[in-house]
Amino acid sequence: MSAVEIEGLSAGYRGTTVLSEISAGIGDGGWLGVIGPNGSGKSTLLKAMLGLVRHTGRVRVDGRSVSGLRQRDRAKLLGYAPQLPQLPVGMTVTDYVLLGRTPHLGPLGREGARDLDIVTEVLERLDLLGFARRELSELSGGERQRAVLARALAQRTGVLLLDEPTTGLDVGHAQALLDLVDELRRERGTTVVTTLHDLTMAGQYAEHLLLLDTGRVSTEGSPHEVLTAELLGRRYAARVSILPLPDGSPVVAPTRSVVSGRE
Amino acid sequence: MRDSRSPSVDTAEGPDTPPPPVRRPRGSTLRPVHLLLGTAALAVLLLVSVLTGAAELGWQRVLAEIGAQLTGGVSPLSEREAAILWQLRVPRVVLAVLVGGALAISGAAFQGVFRNPLADPYLLGAAAGAGLSVTVVVTAIPQVNLGTTGIAQVAAFLGALGGVGLTWLIGRSAGSDTATLVLAGVAVGAFLTAAQTFVQQLRVESLQRVYMWILGRLSTTGWNEVLTVLPALCLAVVVLCACGRLLDLLGTGDEEAAALGVRPGRVRALVLVAASLATASAVSVAGLIGFVGLVVPHLVRLALGGSYRVIVPVSLLFGGAFLVGADMLARTVMAPAELPIGVITAFTGAPFFALLLHTSRRR
């Protein structure tokens, strides 16, 4: 269980500023959804939190600043699954998930029985035990995404940073994956920060949304406060309608422009 | 995610019983059987190779001689035969083991660092650097002996390291990714090879000698060459074997490796320095022997799986065995003439490799 606070975070690559003065927060076991148009800095925000890009400002986990921590110590607090993971050639699912234990291993990097127990538990929880000895290249897209999530879960961190975890998945597999993250969050109190392109899913799963635009916070708040036709139309330059579901959660529906002469 | 998409998993113990811990799959960790097989293959080839040559020593007498050396007993060999065994054949076979092991372990390391199965120990300009240095020495000192330890070996060693160093400097100045480094290696290799050709044209009579050196050869003067290779190789072996898991991590990409608490730039630098040291020491005593560093790690990967924790140490053993076998062929195919060993490694390695690729794809 870990509360996350982001304070005045700015980041960029080779002299170009991508993020400016981002501040946000999410409580223990909460789910922060980061949304925004392409190039708004969503992935860079996660990378800055992980210390993977040059940044200024602070990130705190349970009140403790992670900015000054060694990379290894930071990896014990923040688990990460990238948008486009590179999967090592010829590696089995078990070996891949065991890589998640890296921050907890000794100088010789040898895994012990406890590490194998944790990996077994994670594989079982994600219904991957049947694939344990298979090579990653033999998995389907949905199974691979679960393997990447399993690798991040094997880190046993209080915070999970997931960059577009549903990339390449059909709607059913995307839902199944986000359901699983939600179940884990509720069971273990893991705090989740995800970037998501699908605004409806972002509104259904995240408690709190952070809308970024050109590297700055445009709006933040509950899904109802952020997912409005006017705001999204302005920030995404898109035509959308917001349709309420019976449970009240918003559906973001793109609407086609009226073409003259079309029946 | 308990839905119809999930695979059915047979849990005979029932839903409340925790499953037994997963077992490490084949090829994940170095098992004693891997080392045993590699050592056995090496030992057999060593013995056969030591027995192969113009002078007939006989395997019983050689074994008795080894036993006598170990126990302090009476040697069954004459003084001349003992000299042939201990000053000619054994050093040469041991040198083959060391050079083959060095090239194979470097190839495995390069393939891991660059996440590219086509990488070989000469990728970063080691071959071109050594080639230029030796050519300069041969043209400047025509009477230099390329077959014995001396200035040519030192020049090759420094040239190989210089080539890699230049590649590293250019690669670093242009960016820190591996693709930039490989491109820098291509540029440095092309430039140094052009410089080598230019120097050769200044003294055309050096062409044949340089060409023979480039084809690779194993010739020894007692134990000098073995002692030349040994320190750098020992250091490289310790570093590279310790980096097997880190090479597996680099396979996930720099960002993921860093997110897991590793500094990918430092790991890459450490592995490249160690692998280049091993390559340079091999090149300094044996010239440019191709194919070992490319083929052997591949064979190990095809046989034992994709973890560098296994590929690196097992490549060391099988690289040594491969070169001992190739050297035996080089000495016997056209006896009493000797073929350049680089010709043998390419001639036997290429078709064997093609066959293995073909069968592995079919599987």
Image (cartoon, rainbow, N blue to C red):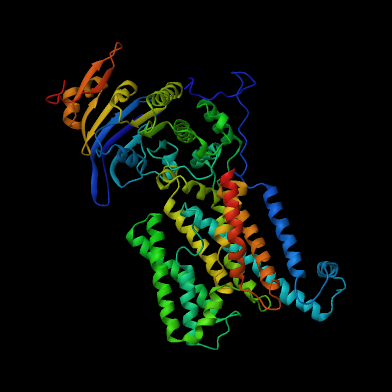
The quadrant in which residue B25 appears is top right
Quadrant (top left, top right, bottom left, bottom right) of the C terminus of chain A: top left
Taking the spot 25% from the left edge, 40% from the top edge, the residue there is A39
- Determine whether B199 is above or below A91 in the image: below
Left or right of residue A73: residue A95: right
Residue A84, given in percent of the width and then of the height, sits at 39, 40
Residue A70, given in percent of the width and then of the height, sits at 41, 45
- Residue B241 seen from this side: no
Quadrant (top left, top right, bottom left, bottom right) of the N terminus of chain A: top left
Taking the spot 52% from the left edge, 26% from the top edge, the residue there is A127
- Residue A238 seen from this side: yes
- Determine whether B277 is above or below A189 in the image: below
- Determine whether A39 is above or below B179 in the image: above
Q: How many circles with numbers are drawn on the protein?
A: 0
Residue occupying the far left of the picture? A260
Residue A212, given in percent of the width and then of the height, sits at 23, 34
- Determine whether A127 is above or below B101 in the image: above
Camera-nearest residue between B92 and A181: B92
Taking the spot 61% from the left edge, 57% from the top edge, the residue there is B352
Residue A63, given in percent of the width and then of the height, sits at 35, 33
Camera-nearest residue between B301 and B236: B301
